[in-house]
Image: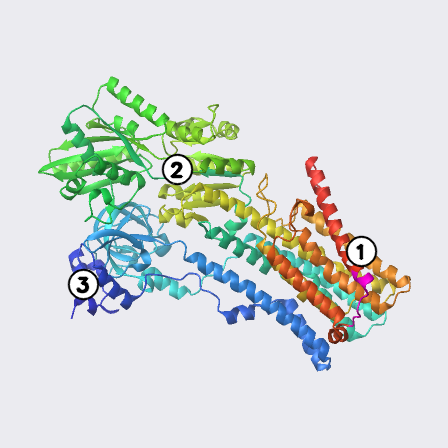
Amino acid sequence: MNRAEALSEKSIQQPFWAMSAKEALAALASRDTGLSEGEARKRRKTFGENTLSFHRRLGRLAIVLNQFKSPLILVLVLAGIITMILRQWTEAAVIFSAVLANSALGFWQENKAETVLDLLASYVRTRARVRRGDGECEIDAALLVPGDVIRIRQGDRVPADARIIFANGLEVDEAVLTGESSPVAKSSSPVAASALLAERASIVFGGTLAVGGFADTLVTATGGRTEFGKIAALAGASRREATPLQSAMARFAAAVGLVLGVLVATLFALGLWVGYDVFEMFLIAVAVAVSAVPEGLPVALTVILAVGVERLARRKGVVRKLLAAETLGSASVILTDKTGTLTTAQMELAEVLPHGSSQENLGALWRDALLNTDVAVENPGDPPGSWRLFGRPLETALVRGAVGRGVNVVDMLRHTDIPARLPFSAEYKAAACLFRRDGRVGLAVLGAPEVLSAISRMSDEKRAAMLAEAEKRAAAGERVLAVAGHSAESAAKGEAMLATLGEAWKNAKTPPQEFEFHGLLMFRDPLRPGAGAAIRRMEAAGVKTIIVSGDHRATSEAVARELGMADGRGAVLTGEDLVHLSGEELSARAGEVRVYARVTPEQKLALVKLYRERGEVVAVTGDGVNDAPALAAADIGVAVGSGTDVAKSAADLVLLDDNFETLVAAVEEGRRILDNIRKVIIYLLSSSLDELFLIGGALLTGVALPLNALQIIFVNFFSDSFPAVALAFEDGIDGPGSRPRRLGRNIFDRTMRFLILVIGVLTSALLFALYYWLLRRGFGPELVRSFIFASFATYSLLLAFSVRSLEKSIFSYNPLSNPYLVVGTGIGFLLTALVIYVPLLQAIFNTVALPPLWLASVIGVGLANVAAVEFGKWLVRSRAAAGQEP
């Protein structure tokens, strides 16, 4: 029997940390070149996919039961039970129908939100670089199986538990698993079988983060069998995060409920005092309480957020936290990376400038540059010109450029042994390696020209000329790298020199000038089509875009000029400038700076804090390990899809296509989400006082009650619910606007308070005044009550068309362009007409058919209400134009 087929749960539960790398490979029937595709498929059938589900979808039954957690719904159920005990079958049927209608709508809303969360979980996938079929390729980490050999580099999230086969300076942050705050150094040496989890230096654990170096590792456990998976299983379902806005709305609903509870109790006592039946007043009090308290707002917010993030996901932007969906619309400053976000990240090797004219020097330049790349070829059997490469953009461009210039890259990399490396670091802007080839030992260095000029032997004149050339090329928008090398007498001396070099760079000291300078490499990274237009669109929307880059000043400034961002008047600062500027000086200049170049990760973090202290809502883009602190500190951290797992873990939003235009779309979608939230709040609360005015006014003036309990319940649960849901699908009549939206713990801005309180109270009072006047004019009470019921049921339906925009007049847009709203209000109108004109429902709801003139008056009341809201909007616009607020 094949050894691979014999692998089982038991056979992979071994102390791999105590085995040598060779023993671990044998135990898993693997080899250092990895598994074949066929073998991997067999093992996947045995062990399943390498996944952990952190979002446990609520079952449909649980969602149904959630609908009955609202205290007001429970009160309504209690009222229904009491009516059944009293054999009031009609009232009981209407009450329970209302409960079922509310539950069905709530189920649809929550089920949609759950579906969206499931969908979002599938968008962002961890990728793994794996050896399969004697080659290397990049696959979805979910497809990994025990026995796979994978490469882990700085910035990667470890995709599964794995035994280290070879490591070079690998350090892993295991805080998520062990609580150890400092990175742990890893090696391929076995440790004792009794070693505790935190002591297993020869193992990397799934879910942890590689923060330095790289390693080749053998997968030993996947999915729920990993140490992280075991903890996740013990922890059970993760707690669902309530966003600040949802929490604020829940607090608001509770506060309003308390106030209205007192008012409703007063209403109930007043009704008994003037002589109404206890049961009748109980039902009316319950109906008024249920309709007046906005208990549906938190669920409505969830639906708006879910619809918004789903719409954004279709545009390649994945919101990892609902909090980001709220905050995106408030962004006022974007600190964006340059490479891959504003540019295509499709680097091209534009030119090679060797130092000296000898062919030998050119060969040394290619060798030392290529040895510092970490690029895998997915199809090595094909001709080099057809290779599919994956790795860092600059490194793949270097390999592709070398192949295009006739360099034998296969021979160069296959016949060169690299026993030690200093991986590229944004801190010291260079990479170095020790190599053995053809019996000789050497060191190769690739990095920024100013860094390599400090370690290279050359005259001051040549050094100045080289730096001037690099500066000139960078000013033209090119990315410039320098190459240098050194011959070592032995491997031991080479390792010592590499260590000296690394220590000098880490401690910001100048290494000895012992290297031979080989030349310069020039790369071009074209701007993304549409990036300039996207930045201008953000500027028009009141959002300032600032480039924060580790690149050369001239390169960054050239890109900014090409995008129309920099005009040469104090718009660029470098990391060196930041060192010498005081906090006050930097804050004073921050308003005019458009480019920060050559900044360190610490400086990028400081810039985030600076702009937040200035009152800005800051969005930050990044892709590397060095960007993670700034991403975490920002109001909105934005990682690019091709970036490291560290960056994605720290981010709130992931741009799957790495495109700045997607970030612009995300900001616009965030504003649309906040606008829709405001519309739903105004729509639901503007009529929340109607019942109190109508019932309370009638009791105080001694006239008959204008509405009975069943009519109030009908309006709240059958008429208004559908338009409120439809407003969640508004697609942005107002556009992004010219200023950031602000909404959060302080839910109501002055515009909202004005429209809800002033206009809402005014229209509620006028509706009661109309009822009182009609009765005093001698019209029949049944006809007048039916008219008030129809007006009450329909004017809020017409109001929905007006609140589609809180800024524009209803005459400036097509009010029927939201098909969901047209259908929702159509259902509301139809149900109201049935209650008014169908004899069976007339008997249940105590209504009479309205004559044509009265029906026209119902529409007139609705249009008058819309006119009042439109007047309020006009007043808001007028005051805003005058620099005032209502």
Q: For the view shown, which residue lies furthest in the top direction?
A: 461
Residue at which label 3 appears: 27
Q: CA distance from mark 2 to mark 1?
A: 59 Å
| Residue 471 vertical placement versus 537 (above, below) | above
Using a 10 Å C-alpha cutoff, classify the residue at mark 3 as few (fewer than 14 neighbours), some (14 to 19) or many (20 or more). some
Asked whether 635 or 104 is in front, the reply is 104
The C terminus lies in quadrant:
top right
Question: Could you tell whether 486 is left or right of 321 in the image?
Answer: left
Residue 345 image offset from top left, x and y in percent:
35, 39
- Cβ–Cβ under 8 Å for marks 2 and 3: no
Look at 74% across and 76% down and name the residue there. Answer: 840
Secondary structure state at the residue bearing disc 2: loop
Q: For the view shown, which residue lies furthest in the front direction?
A: 852
* Three-letter code, disc 3: Ala
Secondary structure state at the residue bearing disc 3: helix
Residue at which label 1 appears: 765
Residue at which label 2 appears: 343
| Residue 552 vertical placement versus 296 (above, below) | above
Using a 10 Å C-alpha cutoff, classify the residue at mark 1 as few (fewer than 14 neighbours), some (14 to 19) or many (20 or more). some
